[in-house]
Image (tube, grey):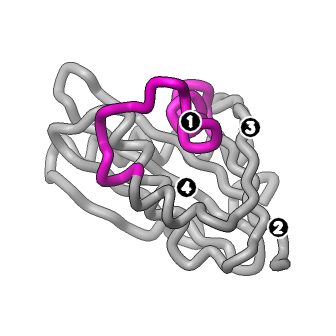
């Protein structure tokens, strides 16, 4: 079994303009962080897209501890414990996530996105990513390591 991997993830969605952004920081071995966003999207699709991005290169057999704001955690919880009536939207992303999570042990916790922690850091980056997507469309970028160096709790 591989070492434990901590993942802080958050999404931001502007319902009026339909743009959304996501960001994550993954610690355990190397620290990896990315942000991205898109236009004409939903909050659920935004957090699911970010979760797909965050799982790339996670070692097989890694124990994954996911921390997300309440709104995002409720969406991710449907992957951890599927509801009686499965969601009918975003089936493409849900299929990718089901495959990516197969054989992985993972937990989900609710964070405080206002706290000066990795959770607050990713929430702020998700807001920035949402605004960038509104202006320029779909994108994914690495969060600069100089920004990560200032995050308390990593």
Tag shown at residue 24: 4
| Residue 71 in magenta stretch | yes
For discs 4 and 3, the disc positioned in front in the rendered view: 3
> Does residue 47 sit above or below 25 in this rendering?
above
**SS class of the residue under badge 4?**
strand
Comes first in the chain, label 4 or label 2: 2
User: In which quadrant is the C terminus drawn?
Assistant: bottom right
Q: Residues within 10 Å of mark 4 (few under 14, many from 20)?
A: many
For the magenta stretch, what is the residue range? 68-94
Kindly identify which residue carries mark 1: 82
Kindly identify which residue carries mark 2: 4
For discs 2 and 1, the disc positioned in front in the rendered view: 1
Residue 11 place in picture, x, y as percent: 45, 39
67 relative position to 32: left or right: right
Residue for point 28% across, 33% down: 42
Tag shown at residue 109: 3
Task: Estimate the spatial distance between the alpha carbons at disc 4 and disc 2, rounded to whole Å.
Answer: 16 Å
Residue 10 place in picture, x, y as percent: 53, 42
Q: Residue furthest top?
A: 16
**SS class of the residue under badge 2?**
strand
**SS class of the residue under badge 3?**
strand
């Amino acid at each position: 079994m591989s070492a434990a991997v901590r993942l802080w993830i958050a999404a931001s969605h502007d319902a009026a303009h339909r743009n959304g952004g996501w960001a994550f920081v993954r610690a355990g071995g190397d620290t990896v962080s990315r942000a991205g966003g898109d236009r004409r999207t939903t909050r659920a699709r935004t957090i699911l897209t970010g979760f797909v991005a965050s799982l790339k290169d996670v070692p097989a057999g890694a124990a994954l501890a996911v921390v997300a704001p309440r709104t995002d955690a409720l969406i991710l919880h449907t992957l951890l414990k599927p509801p009686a009536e499965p969601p009918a939207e975003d089936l493409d992303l849900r299929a990718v996530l089901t495959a990516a999570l197969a054989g992985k042990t993972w937990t989900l916790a609710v964070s405080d996105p206002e706290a000066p922690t990795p959770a607050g850091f990713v929430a702020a980056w998700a807001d920035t990513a949402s605004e960038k997507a509104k202006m320029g469309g779909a994108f994914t970028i690495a969060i600069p390591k100089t920004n990560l160096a200032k995050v308390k709790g990593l």
